[in-house]
């Protein structure tokens, strides 16, 4: 948007994660494992992308937490989510690379988060009650009132942001009035080991060895990443689940 534009706000509950690229698969895990003891076999596996007899080997790596071989493949995701979700995403320092859209070199688009009606919302037992399956917002009228309030607040903040830009204020400063519900986008590149760690913390699975209670919105992002792991590294994914969803 230009600084003096009239703006059309988009309100959405979407958390978008799309795969941009991936490199490797279960065969790269076994290749990286064998390169220390049988390089010829490791290179054969890599050349043929032979994921044949990998199950026992990958299972042993996950079980014994021999994690290095899971760092030699990667996937990149395009992520479009509110700033409060990015803020949690950025806490994952190891094996994650981020490139996020700039709010200094361009203006942020007027796209703001409104929680979907079925998002668990009512606080009962601390954040533990905010996981799927718990309470929705009490009534439709309360939900509608909240959404109206949030829409008006977002619009007022964004109008102030545009006034700052129109005055010629540095973009990096004009954004101080924007709330954490505004959307930002970027790429996240991660290796399977770090992704498993991310999934262990950012998904709620009652059967996991260490049960986590993540924010609903980051879990939505994590579940898409999980699907990519499941499809591209099926044996790794199977062993991750078998051993309590803990990263090796
Ligand atoms: C449910 C939940 C609630 C949370 N609440 C809060 C909160 O209230 N406030 C808050 O600030 N954060 C909070 N966090 C963020 C949390 O503390 C972690 O920063 C975040 O989950 C990233 O995890 P990580 O450090 O294990 O991951 P990564 O940064 O990817 O690190 C991976 C692993 O590398 C090792 N490592 C990385 N850096 C270091 C280091 N400097 N020293 C030693 N070992 C290191 C650790 O073994 C770590 O597990 C919360 C996270 C969850 C899942």
Image (tube, helix red, strand yellow):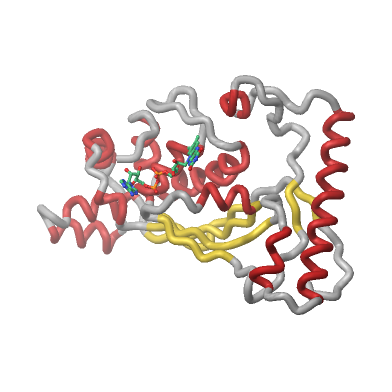
Viewer-closest of 61 and 8: 8
Residue 132 percent across, percent down from the top left = 62, 28
Left or right of 34 on screen, residue 131:
right
Task: Write the residue at 55% across / 51% down.
Answer: 87
Residue 225 percent across, percent down from the top left = 51, 48
Quarter of the rendering occupied by the C terminus: top left
Task: Write the residue at 59% across / 48% down.
Answer: 85
| Above or below for 230 versus 27 | above
Left or right of 52 on screen, residue 231:
right
Residue 230 percent across, percent down from the top left = 45, 43
Quarter occupied by residue 147: top right
Residue 157 percent across, percent down from the top left = 79, 57
Task: Write the residue at 78% across / 72% down.
Answer: 1
| Above or below for 130 versus 154 | above
Quarter occupied by residue 198: top left
Viewer-closest of 201 and 231: 201
Determine the residue located farthest toward the bottom in the rendered image: 168
* Ligand 1 quadrant in view: top left
The answer to whether residue 50 shows anywhere in this view is no
| Above or below for 47 versus 211 | below
Determine the residue located farthest toward the top in the rendered image: 125
Viewer-closest of 182 and 157: 157
Viewer-closest of 167 and 155: 167
Task: Write the residue at 58% across / 37% down.
Answer: 215
The answer to whether residue 115 shows anywhere in this view is yes
């Amino acid at each position: 948007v230009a600084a003096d534009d009239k703006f059309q706000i988009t309100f959405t509950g979407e958390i978008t994660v799309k795969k941009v690229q991936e490199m490797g698969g279960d065969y790269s895990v076994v290749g990286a494992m064998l390169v220390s003891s049988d390089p010829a076999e490791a290179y054969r596996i890599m050349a043929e992308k032979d994921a044949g007899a990998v199950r026992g080997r990958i299972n042993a790596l996950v079980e014994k937490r021999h994690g290095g071989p899971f760092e030699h493949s990667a996937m990149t995701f395009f992520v479009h989510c509110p700033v409060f979700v990015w803020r949690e995403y950025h806490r994952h320092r190891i094996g994650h690379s981020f490139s996020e859209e700039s709010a200094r070199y361009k203006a942020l688009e007027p796209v703001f988060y409104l929680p979907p009606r079925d998002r668990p919302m009512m606080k009962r037992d601390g954040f533990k009650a905010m996981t799927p399956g718990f309470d929705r917002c009490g009534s439709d009228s309360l939900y509608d009132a909240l959404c109206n309030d949030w829409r008006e607040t977002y619009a007022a903040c964004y109008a102030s942001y545009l006034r700052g830009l129109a005055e010629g204020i540095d973009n990096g400063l004009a954004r101080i009035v924007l709330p954490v519900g505004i959307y930002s986008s970027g790429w996240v590149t991660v290796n399977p080991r770090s992704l498993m760690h991310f999934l262990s913390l950012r998904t709620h699975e009652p059967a996991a060895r260490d049960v986590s209670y993540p924010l609903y919105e980051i879990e939505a992002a994590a579940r898409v990443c999980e699907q990519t792991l499941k499809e591209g590294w099926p044996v790794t994914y199977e062993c991750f689940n078998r051993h309590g969803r803990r990263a090796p």
